[in-house]
Image (tube, grey):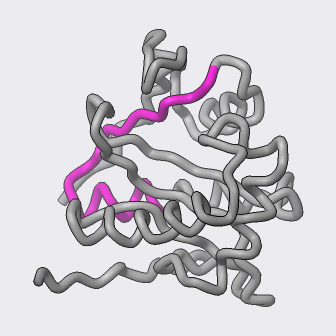
Amino acid sequence: MTSFAIPTVETDRLILRAPKLSDLPRMEAFFASKRSAYVGGPRDAMACFTSLTSRIGHWAVRGFGLWHFEDKTTGTFMGWAGIIDAPGWHEPELGWSVMEDGEGKGYASEAVLAARDYVARHFGLGHLMSYIAPANDRSITMAKRLGAEFEREHSLMGKSCHIYRHPKVETV
């Protein structure tokens, strides 16, 4: 069995950490909402559990993955950000989602910037892209705010998407 550890990353307001079972109720609420339409939702409770455990497994087999992030002050799980490199992906993707009560507070941007910097410095992934559904205006706006630029149209898992390329981050 391979041993691995999911690193913890702290920002001014957030802790990016390993997914944990106590996150499941908020994941279920998210994936039951319209907010999940662009990230594989809706999902039932079993599919949410599978998603949670596959995130941990992604770290085990790839050495990187999605962090769950929480508000430092309250400890509330607010969303996820990090790298996805699954079958069908043509290169590692910088992905994110934020819970409705975290919308408009800058949590997602803060988490994505921390994840982007960490994976550049520690995993040599310095020029990432994001797959974004053409109708996902919120994610497109945030990607652009983070300096990403539209690169091209693409298809992922049979669905149309746009690739946004993030600015190159120096790797070590």
Residue depicted at x 60% and y 35%? 143
Q: Which residues are magenta?
A: 114-133
Residue 57 or 59: which is nearer the viewer?
Answer: 57
Residue depicted at x 42% and y 35%? 167
- The quarter of the rendered structure image containing the C terminus is bottom left
Q: Is residue 95 magenta?
A: no
The residue most toward the top is 153
The residue most toward the left is 1
Q: Please, is residue 163 above or below residue 63 in the view?
A: above
Q: Is residue 126 magenta?
A: yes
Residue 115 or 2: which is nearer the viewer?
Answer: 2
Question: Could you say which quadrant of the image residue 166 lies in?
Answer: top left
Q: Is residue 133 visible?
A: yes
Residue 121 or 77: which is nearer the viewer?
Answer: 77
In percent of width and height, residue 131 lies at 49, 30
In percent of width and height, residue 63 lies at 23, 66
Q: Is residue 114 visible?
A: no
In percent of width and height, residue 164 lies at 49, 25
In percent of width and height, residue 45 lies at 68, 65
